[in-house]
Amino acid sequence: MWSRLARFRPGQLAAALEQRHVVRTLLMRRTVHLVSAADCLALRSLHQPMLDGRMQAVLRRRLEGVDLLALAAAAWPLLHREPQRLPDVARAVGGRWPQAAVRDLADALGVLLPLVQTPPRGMWGHRSAPALNTTVEAWLGRPVDPEPADAGALVLRYLAAYGPATSADVRAWSGLTGPPAVLARLAPQLEVLRDEHGRRLLDVPGLPRPDPDTPAPVRFLPAFDNLVLGFQHRERVVDAGFRHLSVGGARFVLVDGRVAGTWSTGPATDGGVRVHVSPLRRLSAPETSEVATEGYRLASFLGDGAGGDVVVAAPGA
């Protein structure tokens, strides 16, 4: 959010988490997302079949003989009563299935039950807080909406934020299997474009699109950022040879809108934060200067204004 919003203040987001206006929960692609309480309630049922399918694809053999409905029923009252670690709950109810590993039972519970991770998990300044989970109903005072939300409305929101995009992009972002049918239904509302490879792109009409020559300032992205995970065709921002780095949790630096390096942090000599940039290509002198300037801003942000410094290494260093 710091990379995208002017004058973003972490305390505002922390307050929204504590006041339960925003929650951490599994949704798109079976990964944890930070969403509004309203979206959590509305979207979980839409994503549940995808969540179940992805969980089964990973755990089916390891959970052979486990009655998943019984597992969920046994765990529900424990998680509904108070926030707990999923491995602790899995250990408490897993005696009926001694052949299954606790970690696999815990992984399944995160999908079988609509849960939220409670604060301070994910809050600024609490980087090591454990993941305590409770039911959506206990945390927000009502269960998730039983009827799936309109997938078309979700697709329109995606295109408004990230379009123009292909049908494959929509599927890669959401994890859902039905975008082609949804997009066919939405076709009369959408604008059709073509990219340089002739691929069919769809977008919401009337939204502004910058000129291709518009300068794109340097940006530091966190691990697993949507820009490098939320599209099927990612060559617009990252070279194919570097795409695999995102799966491993690399934090990317964008130069002129494209991935040009990775970054990490450590302690600075003045007690603040040091940002270390590892270029993936040779940077020009002006590019290096711009990376360093934005890196100093990031160091100050991460250190809560306590100063810091930036190191831009040579490519390959």
Image (cartoon, rainbow, N blue to C red):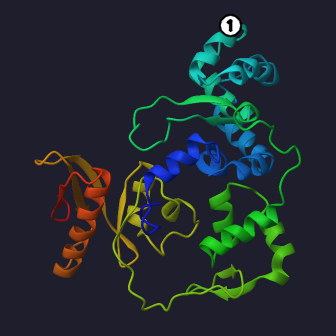
Residue under the image location 75 percent in, 18 percent down: 77
Q: Is residue 193 left or right of residue 142?
A: left
Residue under the image location 85 percent in, 51 percent down: 148
Can see residue 148? yes
Q: Dot 1: what SS?
A: helix
Question: In which quadrant of the rendered view does residue 154 lie?
Answer: bottom right
Whole-percent x, y for residue 68 in the image: 77, 24
Indicate whether 181 appears above or below 305: below
Can see residue 279? no
Q: Is residue 28 left or right of residue 126?
A: right
As rendered, which of 215 and 51 lies closer to the eye? 215
Tag 1: Cα neighbours inside 10 Å, few (<14), some, or many (≥20)?
Answer: few
Residue under the image location 48 percent in, 58 percent down: 225
Whole-percent x, y for residue 84 in the image: 60, 22
Question: In which quadrant of the rendered view does residue 222 lie?
Answer: bottom left
Amino acid carrying mark 1 in the image? Gly
